[in-house]
C-alpha cells in the first residue's frame, strides 16, 4: 500500500486507530458519541423486531400467511441488529476495502445474506399481495401456510448459499494482488443486478398491477356487500402498508447499490466514504420496519401494549381478538 492510500485509510478509520495512537482529545469523544448512538440504534432494531416476532408468534389471530412472511422478515431484521450493526462498527466498509481479511469476508457475507434474505422476503410478500388483491378467490388455495413455509425456506436457503459463495470466491486472493476484472464485475455489477435491481423491477411491476386492480375494485365497491367491502378494504390497507415497507427498503438500500455499481467508474478514494455512509443508511432500514407496522397496524400496537405490560406472562391471551 502506497503512502497516499495509507494516509486515506488512516483518515477513514480514525476511530479504529484511536485505541492504538493518541490524537486530539476532542476526537475520541466524537467516536464515543458515534458508537453510543450506533449501539442504541442496534438495540432499537433488536427490540422493535423482537416485538414483531413475539406478537405474531403469540396471538393466534395473527397466524396468517402474510404475517408469517412478516415474522420471518423481522427475524432477518433482528439479525441485522445482532450481527450486522456490531460487525460494521468493528470492520467498516472503508477498512475492509483496503484490507480484505477473513473478518471482513465474514462481515461481507453476513451483509449479503441478510440483504438477499430481506429482498427475497419482500418478493414473496409481493406475490402474496398479488393473489390477495388480484385473485382473492384463489388466494387460500394458492398461498397456504405450507406454500409460505416453502417460500421462507427457499429465501433463507438461497441467502445462505449466496453468502457462502461470497466467502469461497474471496478465499484465494494471491493471484489478484490488485482488483481483478472478474471480481469487479461480480461484486459491482452482476451481484447488485441479481440481488437488487432485478428483484426490485419485478416487485415494482407486481405492485403496479396490484395498484391498477385495487383502483378498479374501489370504483366498483358500491355493488358489493358490506362484508365484501370490508375484506377488500382490509386487503388494500395491508397491501398499502407492505408497499410502504418496500418503499422504505428501496429508499434505504438504493444509495448503497448505486454507489457500489458506479465505484469502478469513479475515483474510489471519493466514493468509498460515500458507500460507507450509504451502508449505514441501508442498515437503518431494519430499524424502520417495526415503526411502519406500529404506525399502520392497530393489531401490532395492541399486541405491543399487551407484551410491554407483561399481561401475556400472567394469563392466556393467545386467543384474544386484537383491535
Image (cartoon, grey):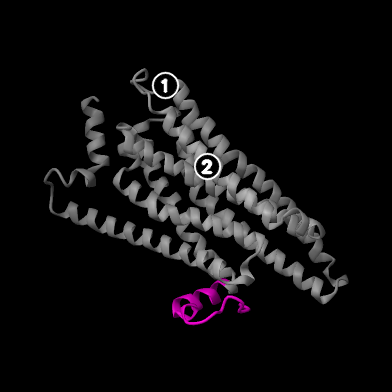
Residue drawn at (37%, 39%) of the image: 106
Q: Which residue is mark 1?
A: 180
Can residue 262 be seen here? no
Residue drawn at (67%, 66%) of the image: 237
Q: What is the residue that sits farthest to the right in this orientation?
A: 223
Q: What segment carries the magenta color?
A: 300-323
Q: Are marks 1 and 2 in contact (CB under 8 Å)?
A: no
Q: Which residue is mark 2?
A: 159
Q: Is residue 141 left or right of residue 238?
A: right
Spatial CA span between label 1 and label 2: 24 Å
Q: Is residue 321 magenta?
A: yes
Q: Residue 173 location, x and y as percent? A: 36, 23
Q: Is residue 137 left or right of residue 286?
A: right
Between tags 1 and 2, which lies in front?
Answer: 2
Quadrant for residue 61, please give it.
bottom right
SS at circle 2: helix
Sequence-wise, which precedes: disc 1 or disc 2? 2
Quarter of the image containing the N terminus?
top left
Can residue 157 be seen here? yes
Residue 154 vs residue 9, the one in the foreground: 154
Q: Residue 69 location, x and y as percent? A: 60, 56
Amino acid at each position: 500500500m502506497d503512502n497516499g492510500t495509507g494516509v486515506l485509510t488512516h483518515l477513514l478509520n480514525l476511530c479504529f486507530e484511536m485505541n492504538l495512537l493518541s490524537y486530539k482529545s476532542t476526537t475520541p469523544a466524537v467516536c464515543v458519541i458515534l458508537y453510543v448512538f450506533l449501539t442504541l440504534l442496534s438495540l432499537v432494531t433488536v427490540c422493535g423486531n423482537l416485538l414483531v416476532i413475539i406478537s405474531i408468534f403469540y396471538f393466534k389471530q395473527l397466524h396468517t400467511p402474510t404475517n408469517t412472511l412478516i415474522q420471518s422478515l423481522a427475524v432477518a431484521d433482528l439479525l441485522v441488529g445482532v450481527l450486522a450493526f456490531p460487525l460494521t462498527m468493528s470492520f467498516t466498509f472503508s477498512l475492509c476495502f483496503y484490507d480484505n481479511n477473513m473478518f471482513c469476508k465474514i462481515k461481507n457475507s453476513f451483509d449479503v445474506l441478510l440483504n438477499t434474505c430481506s429482498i427475497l422476503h419482500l418478493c414473496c410478500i409481493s406475490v402474496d399481495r398479488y393473489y390477495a388483491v388480484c385473485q382473492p378467490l384463489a388466494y387460500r388455495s394458492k398461498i397456504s401456510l405450507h406454500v409460505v413455509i416453502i417460500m421462507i425456506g427457499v429465501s433463507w436457503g438461497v441467502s445462505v448459499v449466496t453468502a457462502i459463495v461470497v466467502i469461497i470466491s474471496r478465499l484465494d486472493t494471491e493471484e489478484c494482488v490488485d482488483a481483478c476484472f472478474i471480481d469487479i464485475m461480480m461484486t459491482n455489477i452482476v451481484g447488485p443486478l441479481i440481488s437488487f435491481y432485478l428483484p426490485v423491477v419485478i416487485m415494482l411491476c407486481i405492485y403496479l398491477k396490484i395498484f391498477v386492480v385495487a383502483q378498479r375494485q374501489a370504483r366498483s365497491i358500491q355493488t358489493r356487500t358490506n362484508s365484501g367491502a370490508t375484506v377488500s378494504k382490509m386487503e388494500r390497507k395491508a397491501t398499502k402498508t407492505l408497499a410502504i415497507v418496500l418503499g422504505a427498503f428501496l429508499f434505504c438500500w438504493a444509495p448503497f447499490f448505486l454507489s457500489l455499481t458506479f465505484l469502478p467508474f469513479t475515483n474510489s478514494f471519493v466514493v468509498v466514504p460515500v458507500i460507507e455512509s450509504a451502508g449505514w443508511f441501508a442498515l437503518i432500514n431494519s430499524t424502520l420496519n417495526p415503526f411502519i407496522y406500529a404506525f399502520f397496524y392497530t393489531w401490532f400496537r395492541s399486541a405491543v401494549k399487551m407484551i410491554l405490560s407483561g399481561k401475556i406472562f400472567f394469563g392466556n391471551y393467545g386467543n384474544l381478538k386484537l383491535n
